[in-house]
Image (cartoon, rainbow, N blue to C red):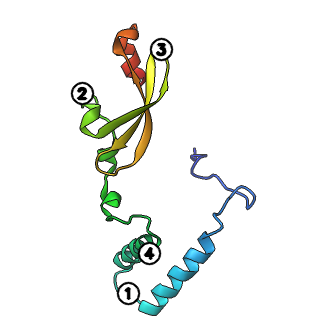
């Protein structure tokens, strides 16, 4: 039997295209035609990295783009503080506190909830859900 998810068909009304996409693709296509690169993938990477530099998206470096998914995943047994710098409290509840945490490599800020483990009745069940 065929997989329904793979055969899913969308109508034009269901597809939402960002308003900037046609312009981005047009400019990119013109550059590809003008330069006729032998390695399209490398050319594309350089082209879009330059676009990021031009817009100031990453003013410092593009190292933030060179982060693997593994760098962002919190693994069991790993210390949260080895990947994040925890900042000021942005919310306070009796059993948990919301704080700003900054990923050390990407400098991306996230809101995190920090719980006091002593207030969780069955820590193993709780960690299995997380």
Residue carrying label 2: 77
Please state if 90 lies on the left or on the right of 2 as rendered: left
Q: Nearer the viewer, mark 3 or mark 2?
A: 3
Of the numbered discs 4 and 3, the one sitting upstream in the chain is: 4
Q: CA distance from mark 2 to mark 4?
A: 41 Å
Residue carrying label 3: 94
Q: Which residue is painted at 40% across and 72% down in the image?
A: 53
Q: Nearer the viewer, mark 1 or mark 4?
A: 4
Q: Are marks 1 and 4 in contact (CB under 8 Å)?
A: no
Q: Residues within 10 Å of mark 1 (few under 14, many from 20)?
A: few
Q: CA distance from mark 1 to mark 4?
A: 21 Å
Q: Which residue is outermost to the top?
A: 121
Q: CA distance from mark 3 to mark 1?
A: 60 Å
Image quadrant holding the C terminus, namely: top left
SS under mark 3: loop
Q: Which residue is painted at 27% across and 34% down in the image?
A: 81
Of the numbered discs 3 and 2, the one sitting upstream in the chain is: 2
Q: Which residue is painted at 64% across and 52% down in the image?
A: 8
Of the numbered discs 1 and 4, the one sitting upstream in the chain is: 1
Q: Residues within 10 Å of mark 4 (few under 14, many from 20)?
A: few
Q: Are marks 3 and 2 in contact (CB under 8 Å)?
A: no
Residue carrying label 4: 54
Of the numbered discs 2 and 4, the one sitting upstream in the chain is: 4
Of the numbered discs 3 and 1, the one sitting upstream in the chain is: 1
Q: CA distance from mark 4 to mark 3?
A: 46 Å
Q: Nearer the viewer, mark 3 or mark 1?
A: 3
Residue carrying label 1: 37
């Amino acid at each position: 039997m065929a997989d329904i998810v793979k055969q899913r068909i969308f109508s034009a009304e269901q597809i939402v295209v960002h308003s900037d996409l046609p312009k981005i693709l047009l400019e990119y296509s013109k550059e590809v035609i003008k330069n006729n690169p032998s390695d399209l993938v490398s050319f594309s990477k350089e082209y879009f990295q330059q676009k990021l530099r031009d817009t100031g998206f990453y003013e410092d470096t593009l190292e933030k783009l060179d982060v693997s998914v593994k760098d962002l995943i919190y693994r069991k047994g790993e210390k949260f503080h080895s990947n994040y710098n925890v900042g000021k409290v942005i919310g306070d509840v009796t059993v948990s506190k919301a704080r700003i945490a900054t990923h050390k490599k990407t400098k991306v800020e996230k809101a995190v909830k920090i719980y006091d483990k002593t207030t969780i009745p069955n820590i193993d069940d709780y960690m299995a859900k997380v």
